[in-house]
Amino acid sequence: MRIPSQIVDQVRDSSDILSVVEDYVRMKKAGNNYVGRCPFHDEKTPSFNVSPSKGFFKCFGCGKGGNVITFVMEIERLEFVDAVRWLAGRAGIEIPEHRVDKEAFQKTEVIYHALRFAAEYFSLQLRETLSGTQARAYLHGRGLTETTIERFQLGYAPDSWDGLLKAAERGQISPEALFRAGLVIKRDNGGYYDRFRGRVIFPVWSHIGKIIGFGGRALQEGPKVPKYLNSPETEVYHKKFVLYGLYQAKRDARQQDRILLVEGYTDVLALYQAGVASVACCGTALTSQQVKLLGRFVKEIQLLYDADTAGATATERAIDCVLQSGLNPSVLRLPEGEDPDSFVREQGADKFKAYLQSETKDWLDALYAAARQKNLLHTPQGRRQEMTRVAKRIMWLLRDQLLFKFYVAKTSELFGILEGDVVQEVAVLVQGQKPSEEAASGQGDEGSVLDTIPEAEKTLLQLMLVEGIPMIKYILDRMSLEEFQEGASRELVEALIDFYFESGDQLSGAINPEQLQLDMLGWQLVAGLMLNRHEISSNWEEKKIDVPRLNQDAERIAKDSMRKIKQKLIKEELKELIFRITNAEAGSEAQMELQEEYRERLQHKRAIERGEIFEERGSEAPKDQEDRKAAPMNIPAGSGSSMNLFE
Ligand SMILES: [Zn+2]
């Protein structure tokens, strides 16, 4: 369906590109423009620009650019027409709809339509029916104002099996559409019935303001009636990506650069009235996807769970989740028996805000206080165990060296041990050499990446990180990508290659890992390597291997490590050749060819052992990246490829 061009123009002109972009990206003013981290590619330094006056955006990292409509098309993955419609809805511009598009019917729009219809229906039931009176009384009894009820479009589902079904029929919405929207349940003998009956209804909005599901609270509590009932997962409702209240809170949250995470819908509403930005999970534990979503708006997440055992466990998990996503968790605990809703109702908004201000604790302080309260710090063993738990969390901060140091200092102070001991503990954890108590009981570490990588290879990676560009060049002139073990190690090498080609020869000094585009595993590896420098050289000493400390004669160490890797690879290769020769038909051409190859590889092995392959043979920087990845310069063709058979 075409939208008249004057309406498209109108929509574009009345959509402020900055405010649209800010729903997805934290932007900072820079001259006449705004910059932020590009939502279309992964980057550490902001290169995504928006010019509000010109109405354009442009990323100098990945090249994407355009106007406000293009932006919405890209970020919401919409067709042009749908993007215009999306913006029109946001700007309150009406688009004349002629008929129900058949194709749109098949897509999710039919579900959204059913959800919008249901929200209207529930809202009407609350406001204008006799049976809604009780629900209204309930909401008013919880201190909710009409403004809040309207803003969150609260509603009431009457105690009937087909109230919504019948209304939908009149609105020409099929039961099938209601079913796909999670609003009705199929009967065994065919037909449908309403999912929500006799409940106060809380519509769940996506962060861009679409209704995607509902939560319902029972008015009459009974043994067979669950207090809360939520929409199931549907084509448009994926709970682990959704936070209740974010749509309404995001503007304030961005301004304050933090948001409160609470347990219930009514907590969110009470806090909204108190002027505090908050969100709640919709019946799930906090997920990394949700934290990532929050990261678009805030840096700090204040965790406010109930003051019971379940709340304490949830808090600890949430701290991990937030730290892993690179955001900053803090913790607020209310007095025993209180929840945000009751606190605000009894003490008022100002008291709550004051409490929030004075009682929010840094996550480390909060964990320490909780452990002390549980008498876990009375014995050296207990302290040791808690210390390990803290170290595991500090590990996630390694991406920010300065923050890492602060927390090391803080931990050392709290536990009364040396900072070096804290770092050592983190190092041990990164290496995964100690089976941790928690791994057995809970979420389970997948073991350390460091353990899976051969020593010689670790040394090369360390050398490249510590010595920087000249060493990267030196090693990569003599090694092929395939000679590094598949997985984290090879990925790190690739990241280093990318970095090398981006920064060129000028750069000197150690590599700042922030500049490498690493995933979590990559970070773990780099962190382990950086922390573990001395560890590895002392291992050598234990094994009576004569190797000088790193940073002295780095080239010699590099050569030595490369030789070890290549020796191992060629041995595997020769073994494989012998196997193939003995299995080939005696005297056949194939066998002779293999024997020839064997002799050639044997010579190569000797060259490796004598170090001849490291003699200068055009150790210039390769011309372009593809060449480099495909074929290292000094390695004879055929060697190394697909030979990553480390023991
Ligand atoms: Zn980009």
Image (tube, grey):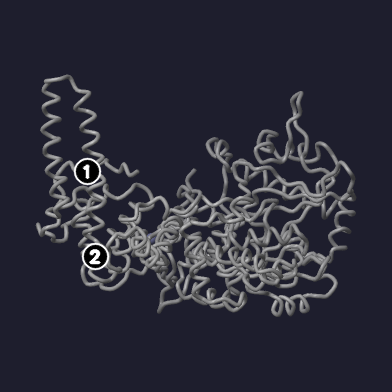
What amino acid is found at the position of numbered circle 2 in the picture?
Met
Q: Residues within 10 Å of mark 2 (few under 14, many from 20)?
A: many
Label 1 residue SS: helix
- Left or right: residue 297 compared with residue 144: left
Name the foreground residue: 548 vs 266. 548
> Visible in this render: residue 290?
yes
Q: Can I make out residue 66 in this image?
A: no
* Real-space CA distance between mark 2 and mark 1, rounded to the nearest whole angstrom: 24 Å
Say left or right for 540 vs 349. Answer: left
- The correct choice, above or below, for 484 with respect to 588 in the image is below
Is residue 414 depicted above or below 127 in this figure? below
Q: Which residue is mark 2?
A: 471
Residue 50 sits in quarter:
bottom left
Q: How many marks?
A: 2
Say whether marks 2 and 1 touch (CB < 8 Å).
Answer: no
Image coordinates of residue 243 in percent, x first then y, are 64, 57
